[in-house]
Image: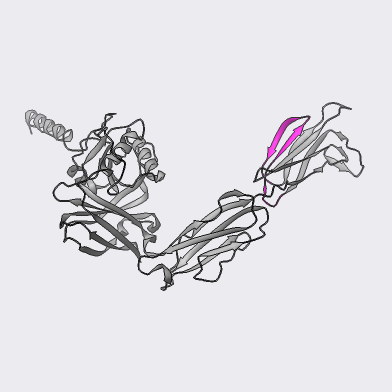
Amino acid sequence: MNKKVAYWMLAFFLTVSFTLPGTFLVNSSASETSTEKGSGSYTHTVFAEYCSLSYCPHCPPVSSQLQQIYNSNDYPFIYVTLVYDKNPKIRNRCAELGVQGFPTVVFDGGYTRVIGEQSSIEPFVSAIEECGERDDVYDVSIDILMRSMGNDRIQVNVTIFNRDSRAYQGTLRAYVAEIESRWRDASQKPYHFAALDFVYNQPISISSGGKLDLSTIWDGSEYNIDIEDIVVIAAVFDSHTDYADNVSMADIYSAYPDTIITSGPEGIINETTVTFTWIGKDREVPAEQLLYSYRLEPLYPEWSDWTSATTVTYTNLSEGWYKFEVKAKNPDNEEDPKPASSTFAVNLHHPPEVKISKPGRRLCINNKVYPIPLPIVIGKCDIYVDATDEAGIDHVDFYIDGELEYQDTHQPYQYTTWYTTTFFKRYTIEVIAYDTLGNQNSDII
């Protein structure tokens, strides 16, 4: 090969490398989202496809901002992360979305997008609000059911309902994703909802008022998956615009009953009588056929017998912290794997019991206590404190002549080692014990 041919081949390679979608980084603070806001009502759940590179220095803030929005539960919003350099199975999707730089977040299949690193979540929130007010969406919904088949195989059933007056023509894209990804961004933090594979990627057609049922088994053996870390994210895209009309997400627990506490105490209360109420849901049976079991730790650590009751009252509770849990069971004996729970504390304002046990009001010479009722310390002396409380001790503070010398948060509560430096000097030793509810008590010698 002569030098001229080699030169042109190199030039061609470089040209292709820097013009193919997603092969260069973008550090733009400009967003392509609209600045106009409407009524704030949402016509559907907004879907975002976040295209990233694991070594992109401008991607970590975007990863954090999207997860912050998702965790807030303030918006009907679901997103999937497409890590371009880690997963060849999703690279074509980045190209279909017209991605030419990273990071790029595409909302509703291209209705709007945010390109580059952003200083706050506001551009993403604006994009969600803009998409959420779309009036061109079809009235379609998606129901996903996942069941573990063992050996990293998952049965995935998807049902799409078309309640629109028009027939629906579009594409179903269902991603298998990890809640906390095996892949990390440039800040070495794991991605969230990073796609491993498509479980469905196909055209669909549904008549007005009709539904489409799909079922398949996805084999994840090549990924060595943690089944509890897997979700399926399914979205439908209108064939006329390629925009997303709705999206849904399910985890492995979606096939099991779900329990929701509807009322009951939270935080710190001053009453000794509490009442909890709850409801149960199951995808395949009515709520009337569900049974429930509950417990209140540490008072009643064992689960109760199964019952159809949806309320329970506890009386004469002592001061302290409690955790209430309740779970549903369907007629197939499938239990809610994640019981609903509520943590609360009863505060009767009882102070802790606290006493300086060493040296006490006895003679202490070089850390040895003698049974002589003289509060005199000569040389070194460890200070030990006995502190108890129904709600538990949070910490004990040790003061010498009004100065905080030490704080201990674990039993045995002690200050090691205090010693006197001056003969015949009067000292005041004070300890203050605080319980987990903020009540306090002290002892002084």
Res 55 visible = no
- Residue range corresponding to the magenta coloring: 389-411
Viewport quadrant of the N terminus: top left
Furthest-front residue in this view? 39
Q: 219 left or right of 380? A: left
Chief secondary structure of the magenta span?
strand
In the rendered image, the vertical position of residue 134 relative to residue 335, given as above or below: above
Q: 252 left or right of 93? A: right
Q: Which of 105 and 257 is in front in this view?
A: 257
Q: Report how many numbered discs are placed on residues in the image.
A: 0
| Quarter assignment of residue 437 | top right
Percent coordinates x, y for residue 435 in the rendering:
68, 45
Furthest-bottom residue in this view? 331
Percent coordinates x, y for residue 211 in the rendering:
22, 63
Q: Which residue is drawn at 69% across and 50% down?
A: 348
Q: 139 left or right of 283? A: left
Res 60 visible = yes
State the scheme by which the image is colored: one colour
Percent coordinates x, y for residue 28 in the rendering:
27, 29
In the rendered image, the vertical position of residue 109 relative to residue 278, given as above or below: above
Viewport quadrant of the C terminus: top right
| Quarter assignment of residue 106 | top left
Q: Does the magenta stretch include residue 246?
A: no
Q: Does the magenta stretch include residue 401?
A: yes
Percent coordinates x, y for residue 230 in the rendering:
35, 55
